[in-house]
Image: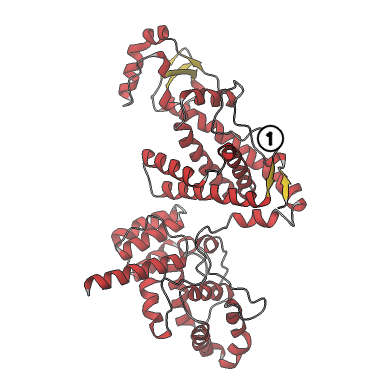
Amino acid sequence: MEVFRSIKTVSSSSSSSSNGVSTTIPLYRTPPTLEVRLEDFERFAVDRLIVLRGISDGLARGKKPDEMEKLVSDLWKANMRHPQASEVINKDIISHFVLRLVYCRTEELRKWFLSMESTLFRYRFRLEPSEVHKALMTELGIPYEGVTNGEFERLRDKLSLVARSANQPVPISGGTLYKVPFEEVPELVASRRVLIQKGDAYVALSQVVSFVVPHFRSHLSKALVLTNRKWTSVIREQEKDRLTPLVEALATSYLGPDYAQDNEVGEISLKDIDQVARASFPLCMQHLFNTLREDHHLKHGGRMQLGLFLKGVGLKLDDALAFWKAEFSQKVGSERFDKEYAYSIRHNYGKEGKRTDYTPYSCQKIILSTPGVGDHHGCPYRHFSEENLRAALGKMGVSSRALDGVIEKAKSRHYQLACTLTYEALHDSPCDAGINHPNQYFSDSQKILKEKKLSTA
């Protein structure tokens, strides 16, 4: 298998600090000399991306800190293990820097990656013992001192008063505190959660993460900008035939089933399609479907998005041709449809051209699309105005009580979570995995509706 030597601007640090204490959390600062197989380059990145997207979903759902800690731990164990224990650190390092390449390329991508990696670091740091905390603080250049028991006894009453007022455990010895310059912990000072004496703040072990994470985040933010400069000026052109296509595809990659043919749902027939659309199509597909019924036309982007979705839910080629012809012929005529549009439908089903079996679009691809004037494809949670979104959701049957929550998530740019909340409201059923694909929405909807029908039979 072809290998490539790690590019220094996108490589990582060793796993031990300057004081010799081994840690399991790299700071990704000093590039090592590594050779990485191309297949590992992609596989490691995908595994880490599953972790980061799981974290993003947990934060969007408003999980509490203890819930997030368990979520991060479970995600890491499930996806970042390596058959050889000695290679776990390398997988961590490689995957981070591959994704750094992927997410350095735009401000929006950098912002998301910086937030998710900082959150991942926060919860991994919290799970480490104090020896690792000290090693990481030393490597980050954070000035700190231990607190002697004599100093602790002199300040015991003041320390206890601050702890109680901040609703925190009362320190029991100097070994449970660090002393750092107060300017290192502005967040703790502003919220009056630390004692300040002679310019030093006395920080409990449980509070250390609050000033370590900003240092990590600041380093990573600067590194992402530098990596982007290197990517645009050198790497992208040098690796245009090998790594560039892979890197650019990872940002929009979908990690679940491709829904080329959903065998669990089966086929849908033309006589049932309107009823099925009302019951089980997600908003993006309902909007395209209804627009086609009303206007008897869709531009290319809409035809691709809806056409591949219908293929995935079980509409056979002959029925697809009949469906699209029945609509388009009302506007362009049967002869023009056969001449200009039928080929692309057969092409999507792998019957023309390269005979590729094209798969339906994922949520990620739909969200990142850019519909123009007169287009109707894309994600309504992103592209609709609030007024139009409320009207569309109300027409679907989303209750006024659930509607505000959906709108709030859409405003916060959590588009897939907004779709998930829509699904949960309409089906009165939780969707813990979240909606990541329109065809997943359809498949899960059909299963629930069939179960409900059987239970009432």
Q: Position of residue 400 (x, y in %)?
A: 30, 62
**Which residue is located at x 45 percent, y 29 percent?**
187
Question: In this rendering, would 405 be left or right of 214?
Answer: left
Q: 281 above or below 49?
A: below
Is residue 304 something one can see in this rendering?
yes
**Which residue is located at x 34 percent, y 61 percent?**
424
Residue 281 quadrant: bottom left
- For the C terminus, the quadrant is bottom left
**Which residue is located at x 63 percent, y 32 percent?**
14
Residue at the front extreme of this rendering: 84
Q: 258 above or below 123?
A: below
Q: 8 above or below 406?
A: above
Q: Position of residue 269 (x, y in %)?
A: 42, 83
Question: In this rendering, would 222 be left or right of 194?
Answer: right
Is residue 105 something one can see in this rendering?
no
Judging depth in this view, the residue of 289 and 271 nearest the camera is 271
Q: 43 above or below 360?
A: above
Label 1 Cα crowd, 10 Å radius (few <14 / some 14-19 / many 20+):
some
Q: Position of residue 49 (x, y in %)?
A: 54, 49
Q: Amino acid at mark 1?
A: Pro
Judging depth in this view, the residue of 359 and 225 nearest the camera is 359
Q: Position of residue 59 (x, y in %)?
A: 42, 46
Q: Which residue is label 1 attached to? A: 32
Q: Find numbered disc 1 in the image and state the secondary structure of the residue it sits on.
A: loop
**Which residue is located at x 56 percent, y 63 percent?**
369
Residue 87 quadrant: top right
